[in-house]
Each structure stands twice: as C-alpha cells, then as structure tokens.
Amino acid sequence: METRVLVVDDEQEIADLIELYLAGEGYIVRKFYNGRDAKKCIRSEKLDLAILDIMLPDIDGIELCQEIREKYNYPIIMLTAKSEEIDKIRGLSMGADDYVTKPFKPLELVARVKAQLRRFTKYNVNNVQPEMEIAVGGLILNIKNHECRLNEELVNLTPTEFDILRILCENRGQVISGDRLFQEIWGEKYFSNNNNTIMVHIRHLREKLGETAENPKYIKTVWGVGYKIE
C-alpha cells in the first residue's frame, strides 16, 4: 500500500533532501516549494502525512495546517527555525502533531515520520476489536474508529490529541506525567523544552472539550506532576 507524504518548503535544497530520504524509505512524495501549489494538492489528492515549513513566500505553513485540519486528521509535522518558538506553539494549536527544528538531521525527520504514521495507522486498521470503547462520563472514545464524542456530539481531534486523551482515559484516576505522555506518544526521550508541546496539546484538548484549566471537568492538572482524568 502506497504512503503519500506532502513536503512543502521554499528552500529547494531542503525539500529535495527530504524527498530523497523519504523516497529511499519507499514513500511517495508530493513536493512543493510554495503554499499555493501545495494547497491545490491538499484539496485534490489523498495524502497520509504532511511536512510543512512554517515560513513560506505566499501561504504560510500555519494556513496550510488549518486547511488540512478542516477536512483531514492525518499527521502534520511542522518545520521551524530556532527563533520561531511562538510559531511552534501556533502550529500545535492549529492541529499540528509535531515539529522539527532547522537545521535537522534527515534521519531524525524520517524517524518522526515513521512514528507519526505508526500511531495514525494503529487506530485506523480493520483488525481492531469493534467493542474497544472507553467511556468517562459523557466522554466516549472509540478506539476502532479513532472517534471522540462528548455528550453524543462528535469532537474533531488530531491523532496526537486523541492519543493524549486515550492514555489519560485508559489510566483513569492516575496522574500521568508529561514525561510519560511524551515518551508514549513520540517514542523519544523527554526533555524539559518538550513541556511546551504537551501543554499546548492539553490546552487545545480542553478548548475542544469546552473546559478551561481553571475549571476543568475532565482533564485536571496536578501541578509539578502531570495530568489526570477522574
């Protein structure tokens, strides 16, 4: 089965290098140097993952991320510069699943791509048992369909948001540290600067569940320790 990856970066050398490494892993790469052409591809082709540079000459990566999230939930990895911390947070808030900071090692990016695709396909295969549902009050997660419903209303979650919520629900009543969340979802060693990534996803999850950190109904913060659902 072919896996199609969208690559968008106006630095042609970087885009070409990413294409080379991904093609070497057997992926079909749709590569663009501007946002306008990438947007046409997003609307017309079936894709499995997107790698978006935040800084583009016309339509930036944040807008492309929004475009994707209006209809699709496949993984999105943002490419950012070291000085673009605020853009990293904006990207995650718009629904991106991960980001890689330039300059990066191509093999690191390939590893991130594989990790995201593993997580995404894990909950979109036909051999998952259909009864696999987790219910916490009015919140229901359907593992087979990768769906979240709150009081019978569908909540549109990104793959990363769904995984965070799933882990918290599966460990109901237990405090789950940011360290554990990061390692289970990204499969990498946790560093203190990764805390922003977790915090942004938690904040976005709360917004979608209609709650705040000050008045949480589901996701509760245990300061200095982590998060839990009771």
Image: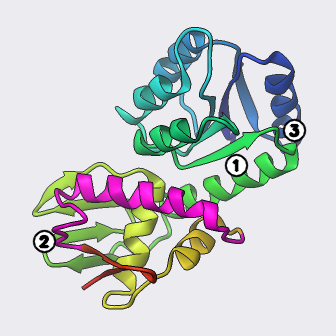
Asked if the residue at tag 3 contacts the one at tag 1, i.e. Cβ–Cβ closer than 8 Å, the answer is no
Rendering coords of residue 17 (x, y %): 87, 29
- Location of the N terminus (image quadrant): top right
Task: Give me the residue at 79% from left, 24% from top.
Answer: 15
Label 1 environment density (alpha carbons within 10 Å; few <14, some 14–19, many ≥20): many
Q: Is residue 134 visible?
A: yes
Amino acid at dot 2: Gly
Label 2 environment density (alpha carbons within 10 Å; few <14, some 14–19, many ≥20): few
For the residue pair 10 and 203, the one nearer the viewer reads as 203
**Circle 3 is placed at which residue position?**
21
Q: Which of marks 1 and 3 is nearer the N terminus?
A: 3
**Separation of residues labelled 2 and 1 (CA atoms):** 34 Å
For residue 135, above or below residue 71: below
Q: In this view, does 176 lie to the left or right of 154?
A: right
Q: Can residue 125 be seen in this view?
A: no
**Circle 2 is placed at which residue position?**
138
For the residue pair 19 and 214, the one nearer the viewer reads as 214
Q: Which of marks 2 and 3 is nearer the N terminus?
A: 3
Magenta residues (range): 189-218
Residue found farthest to the bottom:
173
What is the number of the mark on residue 155? none
Please tell me whether residue 117 belongs to the stretch shown in magenta.
no
Q: Is residue 101 left or right of residue 148?
A: right
Task: Give me the residue at 13% from left, 71% from top.
Answer: 138
Q: In this view, does 64 lie to the left or right of 208?
A: right
Dot 2 falls on a residue whose secondary structure is loop
Residue found farthest to the left:
151
Dot 1 falls on a residue whose secondary structure is helix
Amino acid at dot 1: Val
**Circle 1 is placed at which residue position?**
113
**Separation of residues labelled 2 and 3 (CA atoms):** 45 Å
